[in-house]
Image (cartoon, rainbow, N blue to C red):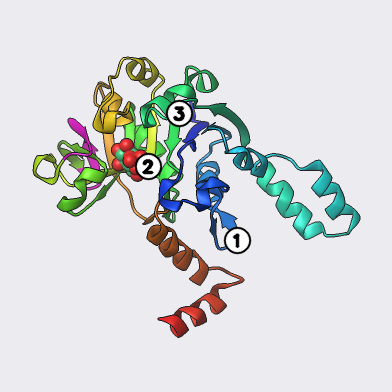
């Protein structure tokens, strides 16, 4: 059965962007002319996802509005004959069927995914962390779904990181069954560099079976006192890691967002030439 549902946890406070994130959800910070969140939803849609579950929290109303229809605005644009803009406004609202569920307490990524249980039901599904943006010829979600179709079980995206940074990520270890594919035997959330079983870190893309929900319900708080998705995943009978191809940006911090903005702006069909000229001037 094709995987058509994606869960995107977007309840986080965005502390690395305070005070900005007092008023603006970090997921709506722009990369050129579109918010971060639209990039990852477009990636999911390109891989066949039709239904998106946003796990939100208080103060994230603007995220819901962005992907909703806007009848008054659409009528105004139509009356003014601004049909190209009207098309853009409608396009965003019709990217996917979007529903929102609330995470009432910030108890960790595992808890956020558990909040989506009723909206997901009894199907395999994708989890996407909106901070991780990847520019790839084949969308990373599509790469993972290909591995999922071949191997079954859970699949996570993997990337090599310097050993001194293992304490920022979930780290996986196990035999490589192909150059880009690991049969995962160990997963540890944010291990100290000396304790990390490898340097292959999880990047925010997962394909999960619905059995993960029961495991999440019985996963005790782990690293940082939070219910960790990695800890529940480690208890699944079958999981593979896919070392993806593509340029990865962590837009959850100001420098990573800036790097994504430089990457996408210098390649943009409309603004690329101006962006490259600006880079040369300030370089
Ligand atoms: C989360 C996951 C971690 C993963 C990371 C990728 O951590 O818990 O396993 O490596 O996302 O971005 P967070 O960034 O929420 O601390």
Asked which quadrant contains residue 201, the reply is: top left
Q: Is residue 225 above or below residue 141?
A: above
Mark 3 surroundings: few (<14), some (14-19) or many (≥20) residues within 10 A: many
Is residue 189 magenta-colored? yes
What's the distance in space between the residues labelled 3 and 2, CA to CA? 14 Å
- Is disc 2's CB within 8 Å of ligand 1? yes
- Is disc 1's CB within 8 Å of ligand 1? no
Give 77 or 224, whichever is nearer the viewer: 224
Considering the numbered disc 2 on the image, is that residue within a helix, a strand or a loop?
Answer: strand
What's the distance in space between the residues labelled 1 and 3, CA to CA? 29 Å
* Disc with the residue nearer the chain's start (3 vs 2): 3
Image marks 2 and 1: residues in contact by CB distance under 8 Å = no
User: Which residue was labeled with disc 2?
Assistant: 204
Q: Quadrant of ligand 1?
A: top left
Q: Position of residue 167 (x, y in %)?
A: 21, 44
Q: Position of residue 225 (x, y in %)?
A: 28, 28
* Disc with the residue nearer the chain's start (2 vs 1): 1
Q: Is residue 271 above or below residue 207?
A: below
Q: Can you name the residue that lies furthest to the right here? A: 79
* Disc with the residue nearer the chain's start (1 vs 3): 1
Q: Which mark is residue 125?
A: 3
User: Which residue was labeled with disc 1?
Assistant: 33
Give 227 or 174, whichever is nearer the viewer: 227
Q: Identify which residue is drawn at 39% across, 32% down.
A: 207
What's the distance in space between the residues labelled 2 and 1, CA to CA? 23 Å
Q: Position of residue 87 (x, y in %)?
A: 75, 53
Asked which quadrant contains residue 119, the reply is: top right
Considering the numbered disc 3 on the image, is that residue within a helix, a strand or a loop?
Answer: strand
Which one is closest to the eye, mark 3 or mark 2? 2
Magenta region, residue range: 178-191
Mark 2 surroundings: few (<14), some (14-19) or many (≥20) residues within 10 A: many
Classify residue 183 as left or right of residue 27: left
């Amino acid at each position: 059965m094709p995987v058509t549902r994606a869960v995107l946890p977007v309840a986080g406070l965005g502390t690395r962007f305070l005070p900005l994130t007092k008023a603006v959800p970090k997921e709506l910070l722009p990369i050129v002319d579109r918010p971060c969140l639209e990039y990852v939803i477009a990636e999911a849609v390109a891989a066949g996802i039709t239904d998106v579950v946003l796990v939100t929290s208080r103060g994230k109303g603007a995220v819901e509005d962005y992907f909703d229809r806007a009848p008054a605005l659409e009528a105004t644009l139509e009356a003014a004959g601004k049909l190209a803009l009207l098309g853009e406004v409608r396009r965003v609202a019709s990217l996917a069927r979007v529903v929102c569920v609330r995470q009432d307490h910030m108890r960790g990524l595992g808890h956020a995914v558990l909040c989506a249980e009723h909206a997901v039901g009894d199907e395999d599904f994708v989890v996407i962390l909106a901070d991780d943006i990847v520019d790839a010829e084949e969308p990373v979600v599509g790469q993972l779904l290909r591995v999922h179709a071949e191997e079954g079980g859970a699949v996570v995206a993997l990337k090599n990181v310097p050993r001194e940074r293992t304490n920022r990520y979930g780290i996986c270890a196990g035999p490589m069954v192909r150059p880009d594919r690991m049969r995962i035997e160990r997963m540890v959330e944010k291990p100290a560099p000396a304790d990390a079983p490898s340097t292959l870190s999880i990047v925010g893309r997962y394909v999960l079976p619905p059995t993960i929900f029961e495991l999440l319900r019985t996963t005790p708080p782990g690293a940082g006192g939070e219910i960790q998705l990695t800890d529940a995943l480690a208890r699944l009978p079958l999981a593979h890691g896919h070392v993806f191809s593509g340029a990865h940006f962590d837009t959850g911090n100001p420098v990573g967002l800036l790097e994504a903005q430089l990457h996408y702006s210098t390649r943009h069909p409309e603004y690329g030439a101006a962006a490259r000229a600006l880079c040369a001037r300030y370089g």
